[in-house]
Image: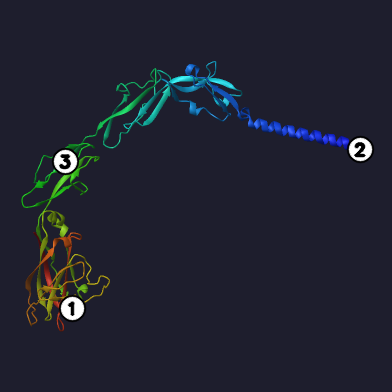
């Protein structure tokens, strides 16, 4: 009895194993077959000889095969053999579907790059795409490729058509303000993005022409290609000389160090254009500092010119004193301070304390290029003597004359 049970159990086990192996084999076969992935959909293009058979799932679509051009038509959708519209998601079994034919209208920019496409059935209307021409160009119309006929009626034609953007150059204006001067050549009052020309110079009696400046005070010397926009240009001029009052009040000067004294300041760019002066061959500036002087104690008076507000032979040292020892009367030794321009020592009443006011005019000649960068003049003062040597100045004036 036990022997029969053992044989029966063995047979059952073999049958179970065979059943399991058979089931696994069928599962794997289903996953490896094309049918297991979905349904077969045949795209039948008729006599176009481009039929395709696809295997699609219910969530797949036909985007890659819709709204595409085939010869002189466009596929705008799909229908079944009865002409009914077909959606892949509605298919439950293998099927053959057919193109729904329409037409396609494409639009290209000035570089012949496609910017828009319209598809639909013949006779239906469609929106014309808006088009913004690139900077400097003005859009005119859409022209049909091959015929150059303008697009006048936005309805789908019998066959596919392509259109390209037609444009012209945008014309810009230039208004000139001569400021009483006379142009050396004819002034061009219109230009396009393709224009390229230099602006003429302007002559005005007794002055140097600095150039043309726009409403943002930017200097304009020429109109370059790719320039756009209307312009209003003003001619600017400069003199080569000026005089100005710097300070009227009095200031006491001591021998406590040049950096501890009154600083007077002139912005040269408010009066003359040094860059223009240099362009016309001027190389030097004759600078005259005028002042009233009187002494409180007998000593020497000093006047210094700088192109920067900082003072010092060694720029890292902010407490230098006695820079005036670098100078002899009316003479100047080499100084390493890059902002130092000139210095002068004089004596108001030699050998005595002179408490009376007197006017002094001190003239320096400096290189124009030393002031090109800052365009600012700083005037400093100091005192020297054996004991007390304080003095007072007032009514400071400066005259500047560019010379060749």
The residue labelled by disc 1 is 255
Q: Secondary structure at mark 3?
A: strand
Q: Is residue 179 visible?
A: no
Figure disc tally: 3
Q: Nearer the viewer, mark 3 or mark 2?
A: 2
How far apart marks 1 and 3 lie (CA) works out to 58 Å
Residue at (23, 68) in percent of width and height: 310
Residue at (78, 35) in percent of width and height: 17
Q: Position of residue 296 (x, y in %)?
A: 12, 79
How far apart marks 1 and 2 lie (CA) works out to 133 Å
> Which one is in front, 353 or 156?
156
Asked if residue 34 lies left or right of residue 274, the reply is: right
Q: Position of residue 294 (x, y in %)?
A: 10, 76
Q: Quadrant of residue 306?
A: bottom left
Q: Secondary structure at mark 1?
A: loop
Q: Position of residue 211 (x, y in %)?
A: 15, 49
The residue labelled by disc 3 is 175
Disc nearer the start of the sequence (1/3): 3
How far apart marks 3 and 2 lie (CA) works out to 120 Å
Q: Secondary structure at mark 2?
A: helix
- Residue found at the far right of this picture: 1
The residue labelled by disc 2 is 3
Disc nearer the start of the sequence (1/2): 2
Q: Residues within 10 Å of mark 1 (few under 14, many from 20)?
A: many
Residue at (47, 18) in percent of width and height: 48
Disc nearer the start of the sequence (3/2): 2
Q: Is residue 159 visible?
A: yes
Q: Residues within 10 Å of mark 2 (few under 14, many from 20)?
A: few
């Amino acid at each position: 009895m036990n022997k029969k049970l053992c044989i029966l159990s063995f047979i059952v086990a073999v049958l179970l194993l065979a059943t399991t192996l058979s089931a696994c084999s069928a599962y794997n076969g289903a996953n490896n077959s094309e049918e297991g992935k979905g349904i077969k959909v045949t795209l039948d293009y008729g006599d176009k000889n481009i039929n395709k058979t696809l295997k699609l799932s219910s969530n797949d679509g036909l985007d890659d095969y819709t709204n595409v051009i085939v010869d002189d038509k466009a596929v705008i959708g799909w229908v079944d053999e009865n002409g009914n519209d077909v959606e892949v998601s509605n298919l439950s079994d293998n099927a053959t579907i057919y193109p729904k034919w329409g037409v396609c209208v494409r639009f290209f920019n000035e570089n012949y790059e496609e910017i828009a496409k319209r598809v639909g059935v013949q006779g239906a209307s469609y929106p014309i795409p808006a088009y913004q021409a690139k900077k400097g160009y003005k859009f005119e119309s859409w022209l049909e490729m091959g015929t150059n006929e303008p697009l006048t009626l936005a309805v789908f034609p019998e066959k596919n058509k392509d259109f390209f953007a037609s444009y012209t150059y945008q014309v810009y204006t230039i208004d000139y303000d001569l400021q009483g001067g006379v142009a050396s050549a004819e002034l061009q009052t219109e230009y396009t993005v393709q224009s390229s020309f230099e602006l003429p110079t302007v002559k005005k009696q007794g002055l140097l022409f600095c150039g043309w400046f726009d409403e943002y005070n930017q200097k304009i010397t020429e109109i370059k290609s790719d320039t756009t926009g209307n312009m209003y240009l003003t001619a600017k001029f400069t003199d080569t000389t000026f005089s100005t009052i710097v300070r009227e009040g009095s200031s006491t000067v001591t021998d406590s160090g040049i950096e501890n004294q009154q600083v007077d300041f002139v912005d040269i760019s408010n009066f003359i254009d040094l860059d223009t002066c240099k362009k016309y061959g001027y190389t030097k500036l004759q600078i005259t500092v005028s002042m009233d002087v009187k002494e409180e104690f007998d000593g020497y008076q000093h006047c210094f010119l700088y192109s920067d507000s900082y003072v010092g032979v060694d720029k890292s040292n902010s407490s230098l004193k006695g820079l005036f020892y670098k100078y002899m009367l009316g003479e100047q030794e080499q100084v390493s301070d890059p902002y130092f321009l000139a210095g002068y020592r004089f004596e108001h009443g030699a050998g005595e304390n002179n408490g009376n006011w007197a006017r002094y005019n001190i003239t320096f000649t400096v290189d124009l290029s030393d002031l090109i960068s800052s365009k600012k003049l700083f005037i400093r003062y100091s005192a020297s003597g054996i004991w007390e040597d304080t003095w007072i100045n007032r009514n400071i004036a400066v005259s500047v004359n560019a010379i060749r």
